[in-house]
Amino acid sequence: MYSNQREGYSQYQESDLAIQAAAASPYQLVIMLFSGLMDELVRAKSHIEAKRYERKVQSINKCIDILNALTSALDFDKGGDLSINLARLYDYCVYRLYDASDKLSVTQIEEVEAILTNIREGWENLGKQNG
């Protein structure tokens, strides 16, 4: 019974997220991606610490998928050097996550968290400036 309740709640969360994404502006989508990414980084660290290596792989792969989505959302024509630099940072984070996964390194995941926290704050400040 508990498993069915958990599945129902999971499906509710997914449909709620889909509704939010459909109604979101591009800026809001980026913030949503960052929120999911930061949550998944925390999960990846906890999986390493608890020696849940299959789940660690799933979490790291989700993080990399989100970073790839963030990269593909960049507008290189309008963003110029800023977009190029963000793409490089996202690529660096992907590289560090692959390495962290291989070495089971919580420290490397924390490095990625620090980089992404700074980028997320930049996005949030941009959103505040543009209303």
Image: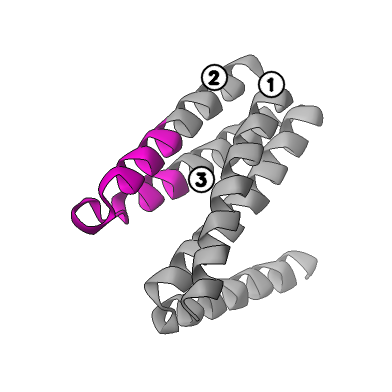
Q: Secondary structure at mark 1?
A: loop
- Nearest the viewer among 100 and 91 is 91
Give yes or no for residue 87 being in the magenta stretch.
yes
- For disc 2, the neighbor class at 10 Å (few under 14, some 14 to 19, many from 20) is some
Q: Earlier in the sequence, mark 3 or mark 1?
A: 3
Q: Secondary structure at mark 3?
A: helix
Nearer the observer, disc 2 or disc 3? 2
Residue 36 is situated, as x and y percent measured from the top left of the image, at 58, 57
Q: Earlier in the sequence, mark 2 or mark 3?
A: 3
Residue 30 is situated, as x and y percent measured from the top left of the image, at 46, 62
State whether the magenta stretch is mostly helix, strand or loop. Answer: helix
Residue 117 is situated, as x and y percent measured from the top left of the image, at 63, 48
Q: Secondary structure at mark 2?
A: helix
Cα distance between the residues tagged 2 and 3: 15 Å
Residue stretch rendered in magenta on the structure: 65-91
Residue bearing the label numbered 2: 99
Residue flagged by tag 3: what amino acid is it? Lys
Q: Looking at the image, which residue is at 57% across and 33% down?
A: 57
Q: Are marks 1 and 2 in contact (CB under 8 Å)?
A: yes
In the picture provided, is 30 more to the left or to the right than 46? left
Nearer the observer, disc 3 or disc 1? 1
The relative height of residue 107 versus residue 68 in the rendered view (above or below) is above
- Nearest the viewer among 68 and 101 is 68
Residue bearing the label numbered 1: 105
Give yes or no for residue 19 being in the magenta stretch.
no
Residue flagged by tag 2: what amino acid is it? Asp
Q: Looking at the image, which residue is at 57% across and 51% down?
A: 37
Residue bearing the label numbered 3: 62
